[in-house]
Image (cartoon, rainbow, N blue to C red):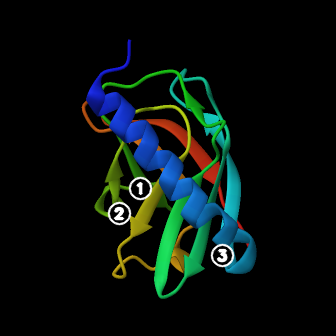
């Protein structure tokens, strides 16, 4: 049974994907990679960072899967997680995500996208990203 909130989140995610994913082909994909599990987590799916109309976006594939975490948050790292870079708290650990990366975050300084469990201060997964 879907609650109204779950239904709304699903519709919003679908709308964002319809709007933003075609732009990934037309606009500049800055970096991309595939998630791998960490700390005994099972994770799959890809992620891309793209620029469009003055914004930088982080977009995960519709097939993105994380086996669960009590407090999953997305951030960046350069051969290790940087907790100052958290940009988004995941409400749902599976499926496509579209996050606006703040203009103060210089993604060229990072070579990894992390999903970390802040509650336990451990990485759940990481994607090595490159151009």
Closest to the camera, between mark 2 and mark 3, is 3
Task: Read off the residue under disc 3.
Answer: 30
- Residue 4 visible? The answer is yes
Q: Is residue 45 left or right of residue 17?
A: right
Query: How many angstroms separate mark 2 from mark 1 (CA)?
Result: 5 Å
- The residue beneath circle 2 is 85
- If the image is split into quadrants, where does the N terminus sit? top left
* Image-based side of 48 in relation to 13, left or right: right
Position of the C terminus, as image quadrant, is bottom right
Tell me, yes or no, whether the two marked residues, 2 and 1, touch with CB atoms within 8 Å: yes
Label 3 sits on a secondary structure element that is strand
Task: Identify the mark nearer the N-term, 2 or 1.
Answer: 1
Q: Where is mark 1, residue-wise?
A: 75
Give the quadrant of residue 128: bottom right
Query: How many numbered dots are placed on residues in this image?
Result: 3
Mark 1: give few (<14), some (14-19) or many (20+) Cα within 10 Å. Answer: many
Q: Which residue is painted at 49% across and 57% down in the image?
A: 16
Mark 1 / mark 3, whichever is N-terminal: 3
Q: Residue at x 66, y 61 (%)?
A: 129
| Residue located at (27% from left, 32% from top) | 5
Q: Secondary structure at mark 2?
A: helix
Residue lying furthest top: 1
């Amino acid at each position: 049974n879907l609650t109204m909130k779950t239904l709304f989140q699903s519709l919003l995610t679908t709308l964002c994907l319809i709007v933003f994913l075609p732009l990934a082909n037309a606009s500049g994909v800055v970096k991309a990679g595939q998630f791998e599990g960490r700390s005994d987590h099972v994770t799959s799916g890809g992620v891309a960072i793209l620029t469009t109309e003055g914004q930088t976006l982080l977009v995960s594939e519709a097939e993105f899967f994380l086996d669960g975490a009590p407090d999953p948050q997305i951030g960046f790292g350069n051969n290790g997680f940087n907790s100052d870079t958290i940009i988004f708290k995941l409400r749902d650990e599976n499926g496509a995500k579209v996050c606006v990366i703040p203009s103060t975050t210089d993604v060229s300084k990072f070579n990894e996208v992390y999903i970390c469990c802040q509650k336990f201060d451990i990485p759940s997964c990481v994607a090595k990203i490159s151009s």
